Image (tube, rainbow, N blue to C red):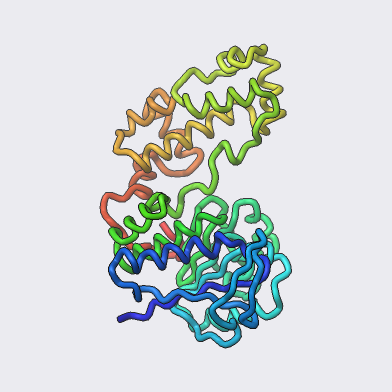
Amino acid sequence: MRDRSVLVVLYDGVQSLDVTGPLEVFHGAGEVAGRPDAYRVSTAGPGGGPVRTSSGLRMLPDADLGSVAPPHTLVVPGGAGTVEPDPAVVPRIRELAAGAERIVSVCTGAFLLAEAGLLAGRRATTHWAYCDTLARRFPDTEVVTDPIHVRDGAIATSAGVTAGIDLALALVEEDLGRQVALRVARHLVVFLRRPGGQAQFSTQLAAQLAQRDPLREVQSWIAEHPDADLSVEALARRASLSPRHFARAFAAEVGATPGRYVDGVRLEAARRRLEDTGDGVAEVARACGYGTPEAMRRAFLRALSVSPAEYRRRFRPSVPARLSHTPDGGNR
């Protein structure tokens, strides 16, 4: 049987979910496939001694990082320990990566890959809050800020924390098929699978939460009713403010004008419907407040440079597909 050993690197300050998320996916894949040895998952840390995660949890590695053999898949999680990494970790990652078939990072684990020189000339991503820092520190890496995971040749990087689960599911689908990955996803109560190119965070997460209750209630109303009248005048009435006062207060507290915020919410709602339902483009346009398919098409082209139909084709495939690569190595 093909060797599919998976080695997860541990170190002080690692994010525990970056470790356990992918680990549970790979372990679960063997269980649901009826092949417990489908993946041989192990962990290794400097010296083989216990490490303390960023949340204070203690983990005991299976082996000393300095003595393990290169695995089929090397998983490098992120965490606070990537800021000033253990001197023994980065060189060892470089050595193990040279003999691995796949190298995977979760969240800020991308910084360790970059420190090891593995991301030079490649496309990569990390947690959205650290994309600018990664790009600034490693200008020879093309940092992609939006996708939840990116594949460039043998190296795959993922966004923050739970995105490591999405990437691991994509790799399981590539190795063992969609049905196995789907059963693992159901067991973990997650989606199979958020597309790699799907946005890392929602409009609501990207924006600030207003301080005042009336404005927060308006934000909730917008998210729940994208097809409603969301003009400044209508929203101001809901907040019991004059349109001028509402617009100023909303922009000051949320960090975006009402119009820009509404545009983002509607676009996100449309993207989710296109990904998750079989609704027609015209139906999606009406449900998300665009009025006409052409209005939604213009919004998609302006924000995403693709039409709604093309977006659905990319992110809601009608047939199972392997993790594919574009000519430049990117994941689609």
Residue at the (50%, 83%) spot, across then down: 70
Q: Quadrant of the N terminus?
A: bottom left
Measured along the vertical axis of the image, is residue 71 above or below residue 53?
below
Q: How many marks?
A: 0
Q: Where does residue 322 sit, x and y in percent of width and height? A: 33, 62
Q: Nearer the viewer, residue 206 or 292?
A: 206
Residue at the (66%, 59%) spot, across then down: 55
Residue reaching furthest to the left = 319
Residue at the (58%, 15%) spot, across then down: 238
Q: Where does residue 167 sit, x and y in percent of width and height? A: 45, 60
Measured along the vertical axis of the image, is residue 70 above or below residue 81?
below
Q: Nearer the viewer, residue 285 or 74?
A: 74
For residue 246, side relative to residue 305 (left or right): right
Q: Where does residue 196 sit, x and y in percent of width and height? A: 45, 55
Q: Quadrant of the C terminus?
A: bottom left
Q: Where does residue 250 sit, x and y in percent of width and height? A: 67, 25
